Amino acid sequence: MNVRIFEIFTSIEGEGIFYGTKTLFVRLAGCPFTCFYCDTKESLPLDSGKEFSIEDAITEIDSQIQSNTFKVNFTGGDPLLQHQAVALLAKNIQDRKIPTYLESSCFDVDRFNHVLPFIDYVKIEFKTRESEFVDIQHYEKLISESLKCLESSINLQKITYIKIVVSSKTKITDFNNLVENIFKIRNSEKISGFIIQPTYGISEPSLEQLMEMYDCVFPKFRDVKIVPQLHKFIGAP
C-alpha cells in the first residue's frame, strides 16, 4: 500500500481545544470538497504532494518527530480519503506513545470507524450550509455522516470536540439548526469542547454575529469558545 502526503512539518497548533501545543502535522494529499475559505488549496488535488510506501512514510514521519511533541496531527486535504494508510501511520505513532489527532470533515462513517481505534483526539468538523463544502442536494447527507462519526467517537470514549467555521455568510437560523441536530446525539454531554472558528481574511463575521452564534450553543453546552486561528497571528505554518 502507498500513501500520498503533501507535507510533514512541526509547528504550533493554531486551532481547536489544543491550540498552542507543539505538533507534528502530517498533511495528507487530496480532498473532494470545495469550502470557499480553504487555506490549503494546494493540497486538494489527489496527485499533489509525494507518494510513499507505508514503510517509507513511517520512516519519514518518525525522523521528523521532535522532542516534546504534544501530538501528531493527521490533516489534509482530508485524511479519510486515504483511511487505510492513515490507520497504519497512526498505529505506528500510538506505538511510540505519542497521542494521535484526526482532523477531518468526517464525511464517511465507515472510513472514520476504520481509523478511529488508532486516534486519541478527534475533531469533528461540521460544515455550514453556505461553506460551499458540497452542493445543497448533498449537504444533508454529509451532515448525517458527520453526526454518525460524532456518535462513534463518543461511544469509543475518544477525546472528542466539535468545530464549526463560520463567516459573514453564515445564517443564524442554519447555524442554530445545526447546533440543535448535534445535541440530539446520545451522550452529547461527553463532548470535550465546542469551537466556533471565524474565517480569516475572507468574509469575516462581525463580533455581533459571533456573539449570536455563541448564544445558540451556550444554553446547551457551556464549554463553547470562539477561537480564531492562532497560527495566522504568529506567522506559523
Image: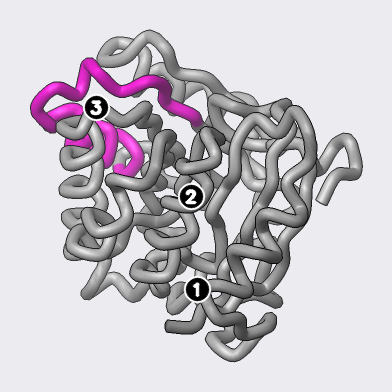
Does 44 sit left or right of 201 as displayed? left
Residue 204 visible in the current orientation: yes
Give the CA distance from mark 3 to mark 2.
17 Å
Which numbered tag is attached to residue 34? 1
Q: What residue type is labelled 3?
A: Gln
Q: Which image quadrant is residue 67 in? A: top right
Q: Which amino acid does label 2 sit on?
A: Glu
Give the CA distance from mark 3 to mark 1.
31 Å
Q: Closer to the observer: label 3 or label 1?
A: 3
Q: What residue is drawn where x is 43% and y is 40%?
A: 123
Whether residue 190 appears in magenta in the rendering, the answer is yes
Residue 36 visible in the current orientation: no
Which residues lie in the magenta part?
Answer: 174-195
Identify residue for label 2. 103
Identify residue for label 3. 157
Residue 228 x, y percent position in the rendering: 67, 33
Q: What residue is drawn where x is 89% and y is 36%?
A: 234
Residue 114 x, y percent position in the rendering: 25, 59
Q: Closer to the observer: label 3 or label 2?
A: 3
Q: Which image quadrant is residue 121 in? A: top left
- Marks 3 and 2: CB-CB under 8 Å? no
Does 222 sit left or right of 232 as displayed? left
Sequence order check: which comes first, mark 3 or mark 2?
2
Rendered view: 143 above or below 36: above
| Placement of the N terminus among the 4 image quadrants | bottom left
Q: Which image quadrant is residue 182 in? A: top left
Q: Within 10 Å of the Cα at label 1, are there few (<14), some (14-19), or many (20+) other Cα atoms?
A: some
Looking at this view, name the residue that lies furthest to the bottom.
47
Element under disc 2: strand
Q: What residue is drawn where x is 26% and y is 51%?
A: 146
Residue 13 x, y percent position in the rendering: 69, 37
